[in-house]
C-alpha cells in the first residue's frame, strides 16, 4: 500500500511561473523522514556532528549522490571540498545535477493503474479532462523527471528556482597540479 493512495498530493494544482509561462504543478512535497512516515524511514543517526564531517568530491556527483551531498551541504552545513578543475576558476560546484527523480513509463503507468485509473491504450486518444495519460500504442518507452529539488532559501519562499539552475559552490577547492 502506498502512503499516497489517492490523488490529493496532485490536486488541486499549484500554478507556478517557469520562464515566462505559468504552468500547473502538484503540491510542494517535503521528502524528509517526517513526510515519509508511511515508509517508516527512521532518521539517520551519525556519531559525528556536521562540523566534523567533510564532503570530498570532484563535482561530477549527480542524481542520488547529489541529493545526499547537496542536502547535507545546504540543510546541515556540512562543508564541501572539490578536487580538480581549473585554477583560474575560483569556485567549483559540488555536484553536477541535483538528485531529480526519473520515472520510466512502465512504472508511471503502474502507479496510475494502482490508483484505479484507466490507462489502457485508446487509439482515439484520452477523453477530455482525464487526470492521467493513456498507455502508448507502441512498445516504445519513455523516461521523464517528476521531481524538482529546491535549495533552502527557495524552499522557504515561493520556490521559483530549482536547484539544477542554482550554482552551488563548494567551501574549498583543491586544484590538480603536475606534482
Image (cartoon, rainbow, N blue to C red):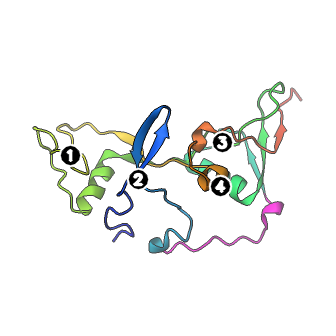
Secondary structure, mark 3, is: loop
Mark earlier in primary sequence (4, 2): 2
Pointer 2 residue: 26
The quadrant in which the C terminus is found is top right
The structure residue drawn at horizontal position 20% and vertical position 46%, both measured from the top left corner, is 134
Q: Of 7 and 174, which appears nearest the observer?
A: 7
Q: Is residue 87 left or right of residue 24?
A: right
Q: Earlier in the sequence, mark 3 or mark 4?
A: 4
Would you name the residue on which mark 1 appears? 134
Mark 2 surroundings within 10 Å by alpha-carbon count, few (fewer than 14), some (14 through 19), many (20 or more): some
For the residue labelled by badge 4, is the local secondary structure a helix, a strand or a loop?
helix
Q: List the residue tagged with mark 3.
A: 95
In 3D space, how far apart are the residues under numbered discs 2 and 1 (Cα atoms)?
19 Å
Rendered residue at 79%/26% (across/down): 86
Dot in front, 3 or 1: 1
Of tags 2 and 3, the one toward the viewer is 2
The crowd level at tag 4 (other Cα within 10 Å; few <14, some 14-19, many 20+) is: some
Q: For residue 111, what is the image quadrant?
A: bottom left
Q: Which residue is mark 4?
A: 71
N-terminal of the pair, mark 3 or mark 1, is 3
Q: What's the distance in space between the residues labelled 4 and 1, CA to CA?
A: 35 Å
**Residue 147 locus on image (x, y percent):** 47, 49
Q: Are marks 2 and 1 in contact (CB under 8 Å)?
A: no
Between the C-alphas of marks 2 and 3, the distance is 26 Å
Amino acid at each position: 500500500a502506498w502512503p499516497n493512495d489517492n490523488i490529493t498530493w496532485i490536486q488541486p494544482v499549484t500554478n507556478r511561473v517557469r520562464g515566462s509561462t505559468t504552468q500547473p504543478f502538484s503540491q510542494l512535497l517535503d521528502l524528509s523522514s517526517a513526510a515519509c512516515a508511511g515508509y517508516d524511514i527512521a532518521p539517520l543517526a551519525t556519531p559525528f556532528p556536521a562540523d566534523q564531517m567533510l564532503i570530498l568530491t570532484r563535482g561530477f556527483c549527480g542524481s542520488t549522490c547529489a541529493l545526499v551531498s547537496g542536502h547535507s551541504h545546504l540543510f546541515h552545513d556540512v562543508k564541501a571540498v572539490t578536487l580538480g578543475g581549473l585554477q583560474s576558476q575560483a569556485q567549483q560546484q559540488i555536484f553536477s545535477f541535483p538528485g531529480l527523480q526519473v520515472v520510466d513509463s512502465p512504472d508511471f503507468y503502474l502507479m496510475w493503474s494502482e490508483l484505479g485509473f484507466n490507462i489502457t491504450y485508446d487509439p482515439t486518444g484520452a477523453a477530455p479532462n482525464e487526470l492521467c495519460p493513456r498507455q502508448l500504442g507502441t512498445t516504445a518507452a519513455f523516461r521523464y523527471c517528476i521531481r524538482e529539488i529546491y535549495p533552502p532559501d527557495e524552499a522557504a519562499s515561493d520556490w521559483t528556482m530549482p536547484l539544477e539552475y542554482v550554482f552551488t559552490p563548494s567551501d574549498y577547492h583543491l586544484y590538480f597540479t603536475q606534482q
